[in-house]
Image (spheres, rainbow, N blue to C red):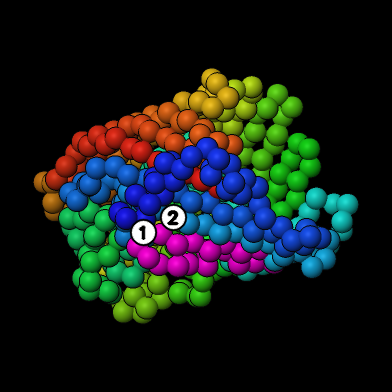
């Protein structure tokens, strides 16, 4: 946690030193190249048993340090190249985004993007980091790891049920024989590779994309035989209200594991996402809500009649109130549920394929300077399974951006 402690040490800077830090993106003389950055550090108590906040980066979302560098080069008014590089607590450096954006007609608010592009589905996926997320934690749908893995498959329904509440380290007999993190319903930390189109007016926003992976499994290079189709449509009203619907469908299982066993007729191997989102902004208030229904087609080698996709529902509502120029309060309530399956475990009774989870979180934030913020709060989790079924943790986060 040394990087986190180093970030919090910035709080000890005198006001004159803090004032010398950049507070806006750095650009060259003619404005064709810009560089921005965000530094964040979060601390909380250790969780080596329940893993409620574990992520596919192999770390705890409440105990991590991260540096994000964003850059844009605009060689022509209608053409730009954008990138984002991330480095975190696990010392990995990742080019999280790298794409070209082209606006065919300058007066139209329409552009085409190609490369490792931003996601178009959902509402939270476009503001998953730093100051755009009013709380320290990440919503369950975008962070909580289920027991599904793209590189390993169960041989029986009981294999699946044994991994309930084990998303941080599930293992299965077919495919990769090592323990590894499972998948969230939608990845908030990785972007997919492909092409995307976006158009917006004063009251309508439309986006569509064709990429290589799936909502839960964005990839850089091809790992399966299919493409993902995704899109979102949103309406913006003058009263500060926005409502959107989005959908996606793509292959989520790696080709390497599918080649090991034949897939029974009628069994899907795709992930399907259908979501609704809404936001209201007025004065000092911001209120957002999102709901999604997600299914995973799952081949089970020794159960050829198991053809119904696994389903999951997730939703949250959050609000932020800025009651003074430097102070804000935020809260989020959410729930994640799973469809029932039947094996021989649990007396053969219908049982959710993973353990349902609920979460409440509240945060207070103080703006030390225009681009420096300190947040503190508390998060409480409930789960219908696993060794630890309830866990409350205090949270503390430092943010600096320009």
Mark 2 is surrounded, within 10 Å at the Cα level, by few (under 14), some (14 to 19) or many (20 or more) other residues, namely: many
Q: Magenta: predominant secondary structure element?
A: strand
Q: Which residue is mark 1?
A: 89
In the image, what residue occupies the spot 11% across and 46% down?
347
Disc nearer the start of the sequence (2/1): 2
Residue 167: percent from the left, percent from the top? 27, 54
- Magenta-highlighted residues: 82-102
- Res. 271 in view: no
Q: Secondary structure at mark 2?
A: strand
Q: Secondary structure at mark 1?
A: loop
Label 2 and label 1: CA atoms lie apart by 7 Å
In the rendered structure, the answer to whether residue 293 lies left or right of residue 236 reads: left
In the image, what residue occupies the spot 87% across and 56% down?
106
Foreground of the two, 69 or 268: 69
Q: Which residue is mark 2?
A: 66
Residue 104: percent from the left, percent from the top? 83, 62
- Res. 279 in view: yes
Foreground of the two, 144 or 385: 144
Indicate the quadrant where residue 239 lies: top right
Mark 1 is surrounded, within 10 Å at the Cα level, by few (under 14), some (14 to 19) or many (20 or more) other residues, namely: many
The answer to whether 290 is drawn above or below residue 103 in the figure is above
């Amino acid at each position: 946690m040394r990087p986190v402690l180093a970030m919090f040490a910035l709080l000890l800077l005198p006001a004159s030193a803090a004032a010398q830090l950049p507070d806006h993106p750095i650009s060259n003389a003619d404005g064709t190249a810009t560089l921005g950055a965000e530094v964040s550090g979060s601390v909380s108590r250790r969780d080596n048993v329940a893993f409620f906040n574990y992520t596919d980066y192999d770390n705890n979302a409440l105990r991590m340090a991260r540096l994000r560098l964003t850059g844009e080069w605009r060689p022509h008014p209608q053409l730009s190249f954008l990138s984002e590089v991330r480095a975190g607590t696990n010392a990995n450096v990742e080019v999280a985004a790298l794409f070209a954006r082209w606006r065919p007609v300058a007066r139209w608010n329409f552009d085409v993007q190609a490369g490792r592009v931003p996601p178009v589905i959902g509402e939270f996926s476009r503001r998953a980091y730093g100051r755009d997320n009013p709380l320290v934690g990440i919503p369950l749908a975008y962070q909580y790891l289920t027991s599904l893995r793209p590189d390993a498959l169960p041989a029986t329904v009981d294999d699946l049920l044994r991994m309930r509440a084990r998303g941080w380290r599930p293992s299965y007999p077919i495919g990769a024989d090592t323990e590894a993190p499972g998948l969230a319903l939608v990845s908030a930390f990785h972007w997919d590779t492909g092409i995307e189109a976006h158009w917006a007016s004063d009251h309508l926003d439309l986006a569509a994309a064709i990429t290589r992976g799936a909502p839960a499994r964005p990839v850089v290079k091809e790992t399966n035989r299919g493409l993902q189709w995704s899109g979102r449509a949103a309406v913006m009203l003058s009263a500060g209200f926005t409502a959107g619907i989005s959908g996606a469908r793509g292959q989520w299982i790696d080709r390497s594991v599918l080649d090991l066993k034949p897939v029974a007729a009628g069994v899907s191997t795709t992930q399907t996402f259908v979501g609704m989102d809404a936001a209201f902004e007025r004065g000092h208030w911001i209120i957002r809500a999102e709901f999604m229904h997600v299914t995973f087609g799952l081949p089970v080698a020794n159960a050829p009649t198991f053809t119904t996709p696994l389903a999951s529902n997730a939703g949250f509502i959050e609000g932020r109130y800025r009651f003074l120029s430097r102070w804000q309060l935020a809260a989020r309530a959410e729930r994640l549920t799973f469809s029932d399956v039947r094996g021989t475990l649990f007396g053969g009774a219908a049982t959710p394929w993973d353990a349902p989870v609920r979460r409440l979180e509240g945060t207070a934030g103080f703006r030390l300077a225009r681009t420096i913020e300190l947040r503190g709060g508390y998060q409480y989790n409930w789960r219908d399974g696993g060794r630890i079924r309830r866990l409350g943790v205090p949270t503390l986060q430092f943010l600096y951006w320009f």
